[in-house]
Image (cartoon, grey):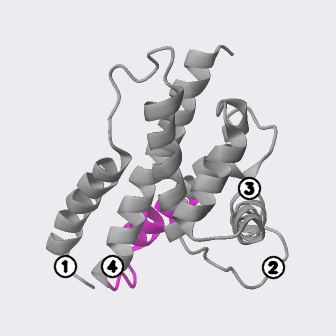
Amino acid sequence: MNRRDRLRRTGILCLHCLRNLAFFRAAHDSKQQWEGQQFWITAHNNFLDIAVLEWCKVFGDKGAKHDWRKLVTEQELFLANLLEHLRLTEAGFDGYIKEMRTYRDKFIAHLDEENRMNIPNVSPAIKSAQFLYRWMVERENDCDAFWDAHSNAIDYFKNFMAQARSIYAIQPAA
């Protein structure tokens, strides 16, 4: 895959992750009780599942096709800045990756024998996807990969949060 396509596709993964996390977070924040409303329960859970899958494609698997290391030219600088942005140590971020991968592997990709599902904290996923997207647009876009893309991942996330909040606000609770 050429650099332009890799940048573009990784950017798409970041945005898909952020859109789904915006929908998930807005649903969670709405405090809706969807007892017996399987549509809303499934939609809410699917937003998280898709976001975790997309995030892991970019951050969770070294050597994966869209891993950030395959496109970031100054990897040490990127990682140092990402960790500072997330307020995590490298060990802390590795732990977060493990948490996301465990959720993906044990409950999304397979239904293993675990009896308890630990929903990951989505804040680091939001912040890391936003950070990588901004880094790609501002520092890695030497091939005009983002000519028609959203320029700001934070605004992208906020716009979808607002859209979802308006939908959840009109949805009557059970």
Q: Are marks 3 and 2 in contact (CB under 8 Å)?
A: no
Which numbered disc, 3 or 1, marks the residue that appears first in the sequence? 3
Seen at 70% across and 65% down, the residue is 93
Residue 104 horizontal/vertical position (percent): 71, 61
Q: Secondary structure at mark 1?
A: loop
Q: Is residue 174 left or right of residue 66?
A: left
Which numbered disc, 2 or 1, marks the residue that appears first in the sequence? 2
Identity, as a three-letter code, of the amino acid under mark 3: Ala
Q: Secondary structure at mark 4?
A: helix
Q: Which residue is mark 3?
A: 109
Residue 98 horizontal/vertical position (percent): 77, 66
- Between 137 and 45, the residue placed more toward the observer is 137
Seen at 46% across and 44% down, the residue is 16
Q: Which residue is mark 2?
A: 114
Q: Which residue is mark 1?
A: 172
- Between 20 and 79, the residue placed more toward the observer is 79
Which numbered disc, 1 or 4, marks the residue that appears first in the sequence? 4
> Which dot, 2 or 1, sits closer to the camera?
2
Identity, as a three-letter code, of the amino acid under mark 2: Glu
Residue 107 horizontal/vertical position (percent): 71, 67
> Which dot, 4 or 3, sits closer to the camera?
4
Which stretch is magenta?
32-49
| Camera sees residue 46 | no
Residue 169 horizontal/vertical position (percent): 17, 73
Q: Which residue is mark 4?
A: 29
